[in-house]
């Protein structure tokens, strides 16, 4: 069976209407082999604008459905996702090149966020605030916001959608989703799954969730529409630089989840065995194509040689190949451009005096149109050049440090501020790292790698990572509008701050 046939069968099983399968001009290829696996119809700007109107009309009804009832829709979505887990996980692996357990793990993350959002639907708590005026009551309440525009990246093609959609729906919003042009098939599948949940739920208005298979031009329509009060955009910092100001210009709100340049500090007091496992998973897992992938290793001078030797040994044994045809742990890069960017970064590093181990293309004869690489370990004389930027590939730059204060300076001296880790058994070091003058990232871990966050925490980062927070904790507040209500139940009209205004 060709991969195209398998994909068509998966899409049918996942409930995608035949009219949407392999019927458009936008070609989809799999990074596993480079072969075409389908095609889809591209949405125009007019299509996107019409979808926004439909979603707005749905919002006007949905906001009136009590939040715990809205949670019921997300519970049904979670149920449908459980049934679809194997097929959707497989489709993620084919469309993005993830190893099977990561494809399935991504769907599990969708189920987890649905469970979280169902509970949340009964906990969209406001506040009661003490009023300074007698006979007055002050409260703070949270209301639905409107159409949520979700723009997602290729590397988590389905999880990021679910983080946003599950929360947006319980918060009373409708959704228009523009996925990456590289991953329209998993988007069609998610939409079919969502549609099934909607069909099972009488209170859900038609058009509550809309899929816009648009390119950046169509995406811009979403970004610029005054009908879309919130844009949640996940992707590169370059994308955020374009999208953020355009949303701000119209006083819209944005949740920006952008690039990372995540580091791990390996102290002289680290448990090097668990550190090795954590570092290798973070650096080479998902072929270095996670926003939280570890890209920089700052190792104490006393352990640097021993630890870097261990990493090199692990890198030499880690299997690279088609994860659906073998048990390999490292699949392909998404495309040729990603490969070229990786080689450019390695060449730039070499020109700065780095020693590069690995990084070369492999399996070219077997897969001339796919881009498999050995993960690269790059020993830099100092943190400079490409080490300061995110290259979306498995490159781990390593430098030495001699005291933690310097290591923290180096750690924080990059544009991005997403995830970070320290490996140490010394409580003073870990607390320093987690403290106000420590890691400047949105995620700071101890004795855990930089990647693989759980959905219960707020996810996102500072600086060029965009400042947005999604998923757990109180991230839901980003999807709602806040109102402060003051109620006078007295017979007087006292003014705040003792102001008198008698007439
Ligand atoms: P990308 O920036 O190329 O594209 C992301 C999305 O933005 C796509 O849907 C794309 O079509 C859209 N887009 C780009 N420019 C746009 C514009 N001007 N207007 C409207 N839409 C626009 O990113 P990618 O290559 O798909 O993904 C990899 C990047 O995403 C990496 O930088 C990675 O770190 C980042 N990422 C961040 C997070 C996070 O949570 N912080 C999660 C996943 C990926």
Image (cartoon, grey):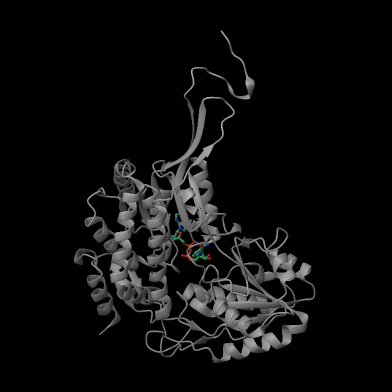
Position of 37 with respect to 473 (left or right) is left
List x then y, in percent, for residue 96: 41, 74
Residue 174 visible to an observer of this rendering: yes
With respect to residue 131, does 443 lie above or below?
A: below
Q: Is residue 353 above or below residue 179?
A: below
* Residue 464 visible: no
Picture quarter with the N terminus: bottom left
Instruction: Name the spot of residue 174 as percent of width and height, x first.
Output: 35, 49
Name the residue at 24% across, 61% down: 196
Residue that appears at 25% across and 74% down: 8
Q: Is 89 placed left or right of 496 in the picture?
A: left
Viewed as shown, does residue 192 lie left or right of 369?
Answer: left
Q: Closest to the observer: 217 or 233? A: 233
Estimate the x, y position of residue 44 in percent, counting from the top left. 32, 53
Quadrant, the C terminus: top right
Compare residues 131 and 180 and report the one nearer the observer: 131
In the image shown, does 55 or 129 lie closer to the viewer?
Answer: 129
């Amino acid at each position: 069976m060709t991969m195209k046939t398998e994909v068509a069968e998966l899409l049918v099983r996942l409930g995608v209407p035949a009219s949407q399968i392999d019927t458009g001009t936008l070609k989809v290829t799999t990074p596993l082999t480079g072969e075409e696996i389908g095609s889809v119809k591209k949405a125009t700007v007019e299509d996107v604008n019409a979808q926004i109107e439909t979603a707005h009309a749905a919002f006007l009804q949905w906001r009136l459905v009590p939040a715990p009832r809205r949670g019921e829709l997300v519970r049904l979505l979670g149920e449908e996702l459980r049934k679809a887990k194997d097929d959707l996980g497989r489709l993620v692996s084919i469309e993005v090149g993830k190893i099977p357990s990561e494809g399935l793990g991504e769907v599990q993350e969708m189920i987890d966020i649905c469970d979280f959002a169902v509970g949340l639907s009964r906990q969209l708590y406001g506040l009661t605030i003490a009023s300074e005026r007698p006979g007055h009551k002050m409260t703070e309440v949270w209301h639905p916001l409107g159409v949520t525009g979700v723009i997602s990246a290729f590397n988590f093609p389905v999880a990021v959608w679910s983080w946003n959609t599950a929360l947006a729906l319980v918060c009373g919003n409708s959704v228009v989703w523009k996925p990456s042009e590289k991953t329209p098939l998993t988007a069609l599948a998610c939409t079919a799954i969502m549609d099934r949940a909607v069909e099972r739920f009488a209170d859900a208005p038609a058009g509550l969730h809309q899929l816009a298979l648009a390119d950046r031009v169509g995406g811009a329509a979403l970004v610029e529409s005054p009908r879309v009060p919130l844009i949640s955009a996940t992707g590169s910092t370059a994308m955020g630089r374009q999208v953020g100001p355009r949303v701000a210009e119209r006083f819209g709100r944005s949740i920006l989840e952008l690039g990372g340049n995540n580091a791990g500090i390996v102290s002289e007091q680290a448990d090097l065995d668990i550190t090795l496992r954590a570092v290798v998973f973070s650096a080479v897992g998902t072929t270095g194509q996670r926003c939280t992938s570890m890209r920089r290793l700052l190792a104490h001078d006393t352990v640097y040689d021993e630890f870097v030797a261990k990493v090199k040994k692990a890198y030499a044994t880690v299997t690279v190949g088609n994860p659906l045809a073998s048990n390999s742990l490292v699949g392909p890069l998404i495309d040729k451009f990603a490969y070229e960017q990786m080689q450019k970064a390695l060449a730039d590093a070499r020109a700065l005096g780095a020693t590069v181990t690995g990084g070369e293309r492999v399996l070219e004869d077997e897969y001339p149109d796919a881009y498999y690489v050995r993960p690269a370990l790059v020993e830099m004389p100092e943190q400079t050049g490409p080490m300061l930027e995110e290259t979306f590939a498995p490159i781990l730059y390593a430098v030495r440090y001699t005291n933690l204060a310097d290591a923290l300076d180096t750690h924080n001296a990059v544009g991005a501020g997403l995830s970070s880790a320290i490996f140490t058994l010394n409580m003073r070091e870990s607390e320093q790292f987690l403290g106000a003058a420590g890691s400047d990232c949105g995620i700071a871990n101890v004795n855990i790698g930089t990647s693989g966050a759980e959905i219960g925490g707020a996810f996102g980062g500072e600086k060029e990572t965009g400042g947005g927070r999604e998923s757990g904790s109180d991230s839901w507040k980003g999807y709602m509008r806040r109102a402060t209500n003051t109620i006078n139940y007295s017979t007087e009209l006292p003014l705040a701050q003792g102001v008198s205004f008698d007439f």
